[in-house]
Amino acid sequence: MTDDRRLTAQGQERKQQLLDHAAELFAERGYSETRVVDIVRAAGVAKGLFYWYFENKEALFRELVELNRMRLRRAQAAAIDPNAESLLRIRQGAEASVRFMARYAHFFALLEVENLEKAFADERRKGTEVHVADVAAQIREGIADGTVRDEPADLLAFGVVGTVGYYGHFHRTGRVPMPVDELAAFVGRFVVCSLASDEEIARRVLAVRLDPSPATV
Amino acid sequence: MTDDRRLTAQGQERKQQLLDHAAELFAERGYSETRVVDIVRAAGVAKGLFYWYFENKEALFRELVELNRMRLRRAQAAAIDPNAESLLRIRQGAEASVRFMARYAHFFALLEVENLEKAFADERRKGTEVHVADVAAQIREGIADGTVRDEPADLLAFGVVGTVGYYGHFHRTGRVPMPVDELAAFVGRFVVCSLASDEEIARRVLAVRLDPSPATV
DNA sequence: CACCGGATCGACCCGAGGGTCAAGCACCCT
DNA sequence: AGGGTGCTTGACCCTCGGGTCGATCCGGTG
């Protein structure tokens, strides 16, 4: 399988099955601890078939990463109201991310649990980098209009992304036994409090009610 | 090597060499991507010797984890003034952690980059759990005396630990090109801002000057 | 029906790498 | 000198698991 093999409907489906089972297994026990045999066994097919759809194990992994990166970006975009003020947009993005990560818990567990053998460490990094850049842009805007504390924007952005990531992580690993929406709201508050340049602004931004927008997948 | 073999001075040294080289290699390319051969080659000894000092690869890893966990706790303890108010202690702990993580960057890279094949995922988890519990206790105190926002203490604790961890990570991976002390100070501010129940308190806690206490290793 | 290409199978190959071992060395102590 | 203990060696073994391959099936098309 070099690249773009023509797949029938059945083929597409089979490939997706393999991706799904792989994601689950990876999340469960990690990439290098998951054997190709495990994946095909889970999907109930023969080993050779794996190599019909994927060049090798790593290629499958990359495909998973790409897929989910796009999903996350879409979810974020959907949750952010472009007309809202910057700090509020940040809050919206953060909450959406938490929800998303909870939803695709198995995949993120994968990314994080994974050893990322250098080759795809960069892969993943690129993912967060885009995210960080987005947030940083919003923060810069916030600093400009005085709603965000005057600190290096990139640095603050790392804080936001980090916080979101960590809460996602803790939730996923069952250490935050609370409904996602509640957690998302909390993270929203946390982020706003850590960025707002003064209490008044924080209060104002937090006053806005966000409906748990049904994640557009 | 079952457990506590009697080692001569030379033996101790050799063992330490192996640990050091292993830590470096692990950090560089991950646990499962590092061959035992690589380790011994780096140390310039024969393969068999590895098994004289360690039962196997995993045992060495565990030893590394344990070692560094203790170091971190000691560094934190050293940085915290038991008589200070809770929020300030949190700040002290956070700054110390950032510095420590930067110092032992290679090791933390390891923990984080690592796939942690389920067996030691728990190992690592235990590490953060203690940390989280400590912070949570301080936060509870802060909530009680009104200096910290009234939110679930454990949840806030995750935020603190997460933030510290992420900044450590970003610094380590070279995406925060700034002196450690500066970063540590920033993280201190970030944490305080995200926890303080009002601006006045934040200002007060941030007014205290912390000297970059030379990490007691 | 013959044919074609996608889909499926599972036995097989083979190299990588964790772990073993029997023997040799260096420095004691008596 | 003889033996004991800690240290060191590198060739060897053997499993595990990623990847291959030729055979087969099956549904659509001319």
Image (tube, coloured by chain):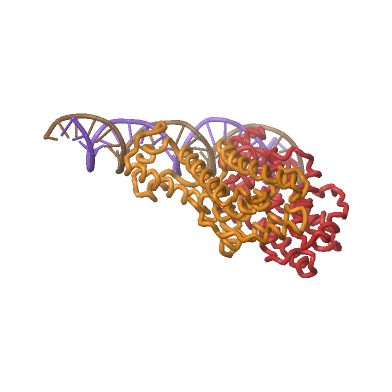
Chain colours: A orange, B red, C brown, D purple
Residue C30: x and y in percent read: 76, 46
Q: Is residue B113 above or below residue A206?
A: above
A102 on left or right of B200: left
Residue D21: x and y in percent read: 32, 30
Q: State which quadrant residue A49 falls in.
A: top left
Residue B65: x and y in percent read: 66, 50
Name the residue nearer the viewer: A23 or C22: A23
User: Is residue A25 among what the camera can see?
Assistant: yes
What residue sits 32% from the left and 43% below the top?
Answer: A9
Quadrant including the N terminus of chain A: top left
B207 on left or right of A44: right
Residue B97: x and y in percent read: 75, 51
Q: Is residue C5 above or below residue A60?
A: above
Name the residue nearer the viewer: B85 or B106: B85
Which residue lies most toward the bottom here?
A: B144
Name the residue nearer the viewer: A194 or C10: A194
Q: How many marks?
A: 0
B184 on left or right of A1: right
What residue sits 35% from the left and 39% below the top?
Answer: A48
What residue sits 38% from the left and 41% below the top?
Answer: A50
Q: Is residue B18 above or below residue C2?
A: below
User: Is residue B11 among what the camera can see?
Assistant: no
